[in-house]
Image (cartoon, coloured by chain):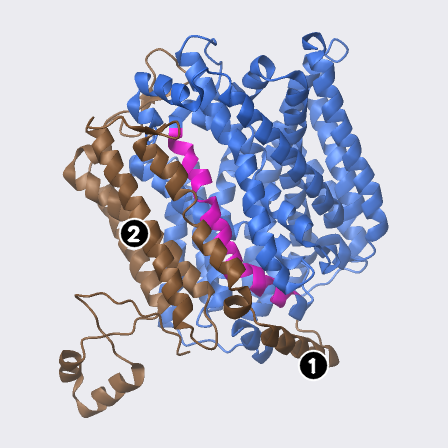
Amino acid sequence: MDNYFLFSIPFAYFQIEKAKLQDACKSGNVGLTLKKRKTIHVKTTQWFLIFLLFLLAIVCSLFCTETPEHATGQQHPVYKSMVKSGPQIADSALGKWLSFAFGATIICLFTTTLVIGSRRRQPNPIQRRWLLAGGIFYLLVFSAMCMAYWQYNDGQTTIYFGGLPAPTAWMVYGMWFCPLFFSILYIARFHQWILSPEEEEAFRKIIEKSANHSPKN
Amino acid sequence: MEAYRSPIILACVGLYMLLCIVVGIWALRKTKSTHDFFMAGRDLGIMVTAFAVFSSTLSGFGFVGGPGLVYRLGMSSFWMVICIIMGFNISFYLLAKRLRLFSELGGSISLPDVVALRYGNRSTALLTAIAILLGVFGYLATQILAMAVVLKDILTETSLLAGISLEWCVFISCFLLVFYSVTGGIVASVYTDLIQGGVMIVAATLVFLTVLFTFDGGFTEISQTIGADDEAAIGPWGTLGMIGCLSWFFVFGLGGSGQPHVITKMMMYKKVSDARFILPVSIVGYLFSALLWISIGLVMRALVLSGRHPELANADAAASQFLQNYAHPVLAGVVFAGLFAAIMSTADAFLNIGTAAVMHDIPKALGKKLSNELTWARVTTVLLTLLSALFALYSGDLVAILGAFGWGTFAAAIVPTVTIGFNWKRATPLAANTAIVSSLLINFFVKFYKVPIPYNIDVGALSLAVSLCLFFVISFSSKPPPIDPDVEAVMDM
């Protein structure tokens, strides 16, 4: 299925179309082709696997490093039914970036999943660009939340917004509502991107045809 | 009014239960075939489907365990809620259309049915049914137990039934659940979901408003009180820390599309294009209902820390303590009815898919077909409830392990097989089978042997990532499988 999802990454912008690669292989020009055309079409599902492997690599690295004592909280010294925080992963530079990468990868996975869900017979670059824009927006909000949190964790800021400290406000008002962007796209572009009336009609014909034959299941 | 608090609460709960019985009797008339019993005749409207989707997602956990977690861990468990809009998006982008089309194409009455249609493979359908059944046992037992515990709490407050035993409460709960599930099947279930969803929205909104006025300074004072004791508790990651929270974000976000009791509702609505309206209604309903989860836990933590309320005996008492001490009696009654609503809407959904797995999916995958499926469906519903009730009462820790096992296992087994597999033609039956088996093994192994995972990464998140990885690697390394032309045509839509 020629259903590709083009990610434009400035520094690694590769494009290898299957047929061209095969031609290049036949003529022994693979290296040359790669040098000449530094662009690769990576399928959405391949991107998904790449993000997934990256996520698992982060998890593996966490297994390899020692978890500081009480990193996931400790019993509150006064109130036994509560947990009090311990040392935070963001206290170390490595932990800070590792956990940021963990969250960013999850958002990339979410966005890629939506792109997989919007695959159709006819590729729709506009739709993908919108979904990608939503993903980038989601990533930006996550980054803003992390930056606000790092400042908060260092004791630099105690600004309150909407009744909550700044990083928590980013989480509640930003991270929570940000995916509404995708919901609005789904509602507004349903017939163009999800299921057109023509496709519904085509489906009716399939059902009528199969009703004349044996049931599918 | 305060003197009548217990009778008011009991009256609200009683009224709600009566309503469920009435719906059950009404639905009995509408249920004439197995297709009606399991799929509601594929005739549900926008509101009914949307309310069924969100109220099944938010189980009793959202009303008891959720506030308890916020009280105990601070902001950490917010991440289970924060990801839900994205979770609904993923479910609708990937499944709402496909499941609806596949179910009509195959005349399917369950999730394993459509899995069999998509992969053309009985073993994949069998494994899906087994994974569903295992999860259902744990979930159903915990829901029944939760319902009985809450009922006991309410009844012991009255003078007449103060000494009622937990067994009797389990019996009453099961009777009610069985009554409307057996008589009306999924029709009763989704229409009670409509009432339940409405009750949950009203209750949660009123509770949120009550919480805002508990402290003079509103939410800012609540935050500052918690922050003065422990800054991290009111920070975005709470006391659990960033990695643990993000693992919840992952498993509850992506894993939402792997919950069979929720996604089977996407096979039941009338018109495919209704999906565009079902999504926003589901999101709005969930957002309102989740207000209870996030607000009660925080206010109770602040009340205890400020010395205005004695320390709770256990974190799960946060919701009931708040309602009994700070909410108007009528509101407390509505919320308790809402709590029953949340528990029952999830329980009946599980009962429905569990029954389908036992009397339809597993026999079918083994090449057998029962005659008079509708009668068997009703008998199986009763037996499954009885078994789950016994399991809840007498299995000890196993019920907690299976209860916790549910979400992650469903996510890890069903997200690759259904969510991705229904949108990706290269997905192979072998890859789907491997994903399901790996999800069961990882979740059971880690839970049963209490394997330590760094930074409390959720085991469901870990198993989801591993099963997805196996699914993709096996599919990429296999030949693209042959697909039925009609199935392929639907996958191209």
Disc 2 on helix, strand or loop?
helix
Q: Colour of chain A?
A: brown
Q: Which residue occupies the foreground of this view, B350 or B252?
A: B252
Q: Is residue B423 left or right of residue A73?
A: right
Q: Residue at x 73, y 58 (%)?
A: B43
List the residue tagged with mark 2: A55
**Residue B342 showing in the rendered view:** yes
**Residues in magenta?**
B75-103
Please, which chain is the residue tagged with disc 1 on?
A
Q: Quadrant of residue B173?
A: top right
Q: Colour of chain B?
A: blue
- Disc 1 marks a residue whose amino acid type is Lys
Nearer to me, B67 or B276: B276
Q: Earlier in the sequence, mark 2 or mark 1?
A: 2
Q: Quadrant of the N terminus of chain B?
A: top right
Residue at image position (76%, 31%) is B17
> On the rendered image, what quadrant is the C terminus of chain B found in?
bottom right
List the residue tagged with mark 1: A209
Q: Position of residue B408 (x, y in %)?
A: 46, 45
Residue B270 x, y percent position in the rendering: 70, 60
Give the residue furthest to the right: B29
Q: Amino acid at mark 2?
A: Leu
Viewer-side residue, B28 vs B128: B28
> What type of secondary structure mainly makes up the magenta span?
helix
Image mark 2: chain? A
**What residue is at 42 percent from the left and 33 percent from the top?**
B77
Q: Position of residue B332 (x, y in %)?
A: 64, 21
